[in-house]
Each structure stands twice: as C-alpha cells, then as structure tokens.
Amino acid sequence: MNGSAIAASGLRKAYKDKVVLDGIDLDVRVGTIFALLGPNGSGKTTTVNVLTTLLAPDAGTVVVAGHDVAKDTKAVRAAIGVTGQFASVDDLLTGEENLLLMADLLHLPKAEGRRVAARLLDRFDLAEAASKPAATYSGGMRRKLDLAMTLVGEPRIIFLDEPTTGLDPRSRRTMWEIIRELVAGGTTVFLTTQYLEEADQLADRIAVLDQGRLVAEGTAGELKRRMPGSHVRLRFTGRHELDAAARILPGSTRDDEELTLRVPGDGGVRSLRALLDELDAHSVDVEELSVHTPDLDDVFLALTGTANKEADAR
Amino acid sequence: MNVIADSRTMLRRNLRHTTRNPVALFNGIVMPVFLMFLMVYVFGDAFSVGVDYADYATPGLMLTTICYGVGATAISVNSDMTTGFIDRLRVMDVSRAAVLNAHVIVTMLRSLVAIAFVTGVAFLMGFRPSAGPAEWLGVIGVVMLTVLAIGWLTVAFGLAAKTPESAGLAAVPLMLLPFLSSAFVPAETMGPGARQFAEYQPFTPIIETLRGLLTGSPSAGPAVAAIAWCAGLALIGYLWARASFNKRA
C-alpha cells in the first residue's frame, strides 16, 4: 500500500498561446483511487494523455509504475491500461471479437486469449451479448466492454477518463462497483470526472483541476472541511435557552423563529467537544445538534473560478 | 516479429469490417458496375472513340472502381482515429506500421476483388482485350501500384480529417477525377481548360498505360509517367499519413 504508482511534477502544456496545463504536480499511491475533478475544458483529458504516453508535455516529468514516461515509454505502456473518454470499442466486431482482438495484440496464446475473454464477458455480465456486434450495445454495455478490453492485459494501473459520463444512474452504480472491485484486487485507478458525487463515492484522494491548475487536493473530507461554510446548528426548546447560548457563543447567528443558532466551526470532534463543554458549563440545554459540512458541490463551486461566477449570478 | 503478427491481426479485423459494412461493398462493387452499364449501354454509342466502346471504357472503369472503393477506407481510418481506437492501440504499443499497413492492404485487396468483378461484367458486355498473359501481369502491376498510391493518400485524408463525414467527403474528388481524364472520352475531344487538365492529371497516363496493355500496343511514354505519378503520390500519401498519425494520435 505504499509507493507511488503515478508521480508527476511541473507538467506544462500549451497549444500555441493557449495554456492547457499550467504546472501540475500529482502523486498517486499504489492501490488507491485518485480522482481528478474538473469542469469541461479544465485539462483533464490532456492530463490523462500526458500520463499515458499519448502526449509529450512541454515541461515537467512523469513517472508511472516506476518508469519515466519520456525515456521508458514501452515499460510504462506495459504496465498501464487506458479507457478513453468515448467508449473506443469496435462497433463492427462482436463483444467477444473485441476482446479477442486485444488478446491477439497483446500476443496471448490463442487458448488463453479465449479464456480471458470468456472470463471478462462473464464478469461484466456481457456473456449473453458476446456474439452481437458492439454497435447494438447500450451505453452502459459499451462502457463495460471498453473497460473489459482494457483489462485483457491485466494492467497494474488503470486510467479512466470520465468513465460514467452519459450513463444512466443504474449503469453508473454498476461501473462504480467494478472500479471498487479492481482496487480491492490491488490495482491503482486514476479517474477523471466532472461529477462530485463520483469522486466523493470512489476516490481516496481528489484533486480539483481548474483552467490547467490544481486548485485543491486532499480526501473528500479534507476538501469539505477546507470550506469556510462548515457550521454546527443547535436547536433549543425555548427563547430563554437561545438567548443564553447566543450570549456565550459570540460570532454565531440566531434564528428566532426556528429557535436555532448557527455556530461557525470545522465540525471536528475536538471543537465539538469544546462547544458542548461550554454550553454545559453555563447549563444551557440543547434539544438538537447537527453538523453541516458543505458537500463537494459547495467546494467545487467555491474553488473553480468559472463555477464561482455562475454561483454569484444565481 | 510483432509488427508482422500485429499487421496480420489488424488485417483480419479490417477484412471483417469490409464484409460487415454493406455500404462499402455497395460503393466498391455495385457502383462501378452500374457506372459500367451507364457508360457502355446508355452513353457509349453516343461517343465516337474509334473503337468498340466496351474496349475503350474498361481501363478507365478499372481506375474508377479503385476511386469508388477508397471512400470506405477514409471513413474507416478516420473513425479509428476519432473514436480513440488508435489511441487505445498506441497505449498497447501496437506499431503505427501495423495499424496503417493493414488499412492500405485491405484497400488493395478490396480493390482487386472489385476490379475482378467489374472486368468480369465488362467481358459480358463485349469487352475483348487483346492482352496476353504478360500484358495481364502488367495490368495487375499497374493496378496494384495505383491502389497503393491512392490507398496511402486516402489513409492520409482519413487521418487528417476532423470527422468521418469530412473524411468521406475528401474522397469525392477522387471519384470525380476520372471524368476529367481520358477514361470515358479522349482528352482531345474536350473543351479548352478541361482538355489541358485531362492531359496533365495523373489518371490519364495510368489509363492510357492500362489501355495500351489491354487493347493496343503498350507504349513507354505514358507508362513511365504513370509509374512516376504513382510512386510520387504513394510517397506523399505515406509521409502525410505518418505525420498526421504522429501528431494526432
């Protein structure tokens, strides 16, 4: 569980005078899920292309699976699997033929190729559709086939560029399950997404990308706590308690109708205990206490400039 | 040798594509046969070319067949590029040579089958070539060289185009060029401008070489020009395709 699967530092990439990546540093631990979160056009796909040897950065270094991407491209490619933003399955081939094509290109012996294909079709619930052309598959099935094709080579590190964009909620959950299973088996997953819920659900660590820069990085919880909006909400049985509490907790905001008091704070255990001790010391009874951490949507809107403007406009 | 094994794998895949894509088969075989009917039965008697019209038009229709077949290649190369399929292959370390060669080879095979069809129909319609076995070999050689040149150009179009639609469109000039060559009527009978264009465009020497081999006495002049054009176009197509592949994939 230790060691770097992916380490990038100082990545820069510009097309003519448009800067796409503006100094990106990343460190993804072996066996974890790392989510790169960002709106459309923030540079997610460019980052994936650089990390997966498809695009040379203008500056910066990338080490994937212990190999330098620029110098030891072959070794990197042997260790990784990539599922692009659009399911790149071959529409005119059947599901099974798609998998066998991958097996052939990886130079697996025929019998083993067939075995691997059969196992993956089974595992991804595609066995029934195995002999139908991929063109007839639903969006969710195409994504599953796409990922299955990536898994034929048993890569240690998998890159998933927006793996659930355009999928219905049910297919999205299936995809999440599959990704969790992969990591349980020791694989490292690097995924990009524009869905906060997805990053929140899956990722051990999240980096927020905006206009080619990483504006925040941490666990979902850390990112949420970094928000200024965290607060504790106290509800009282009567006006008398509310008055008393408001006196001893300066900086809080009261709502006389709801008989609630909003106390700013990070919602951590230590500060919560201090707050309750303070109320106890003054013998103020609290009827109900709840901690409000902003969800990732709040974090996202606050951190990414473009979203911020939208939020202000609302 | 991975390149050879991978080329075989990709070749098998592209052949499957051809057999499962009715539009490609239609454009590649049915259209040229239809054009042959149109030219020989409908228009042919109205053109005065000095020889039996089936004999005159068949070499040009062989070339036209190649041009109608390559649209499918451009579209297929382009969808490999735009759907990310080529990216997938690149990450798997499949060589560029295997990916692109397979497209060119399948184009050649498809064209040869289509030309065999069209020539067969030509025989039914009165085509009576005077070519012996040596000349026929020469015909096959010139046809292969031409498909190689047009095939590489088309692969380059396919790689450079932004969408499959525009890739398909890029092959349209190739379908029109035979009409502005000596394929269906001699260049001398055309109006000014069209005539000069027909005389100097690459298809005319290729058609004249085929015509010489099939129905007359082969002459060296057009043959040299044809080979030079094909070699030049194949090289341009190959270099352009290589550059686009490296840049975009």
Image (cartoon, rainbow, N blue to C red):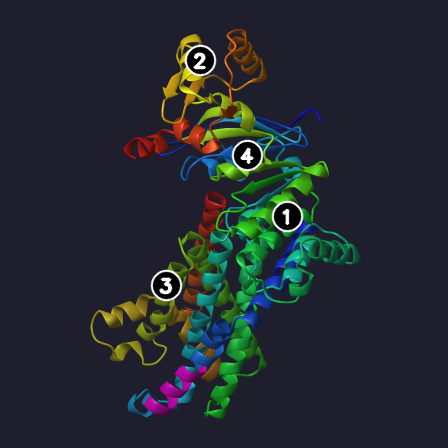
Residue A136, image quadrant: bottom right
Residue with the mark numbered 3: B169
B187 to B80, vertically: above or below: below
Q: Position of residue B39 (x, y in %)?
A: 36, 85
- What secondary structure is the magenta-colored segment mainly? helix
Residue found farthest to the left: B192
Residue for point 77% across, 56% down: A115
Residue with the mark numbered 2: A245
Residue with the mark numbered 1: A150
Q: Which of B229 and A87 is in front in this view?
A: A87
C-alpha distance separating marks 1 and 3: 33 Å
Q: Nearer the viewer, mark 4 or mark 3?
A: 4
Is B41 part of what is drawn in magenta? yes
B191 to A121, vertically: above or below: below
The chain that hosts pointer 1 is A
C-alpha distance separating marks 4 and 1: 24 Å
Residue A46: mark in rendering = none
Q: Do labels 1 and 2 share a chain?
A: yes
The chain that hosts pointer 2 is A
Count of all numbered marks drawn on residues in the image: 4
Please tell me whether mark 2 sits on a helix, a strand or a loop. helix
Q: Which of A248 and A94 is in front in this view?
A: A248
Is A74 part of what is drawn in magenta? no
Crowd around label 2: few <14 · some 14–19 · many ≥20 (10 Å): many
Sequence-wise first label, 4 or 1: 1
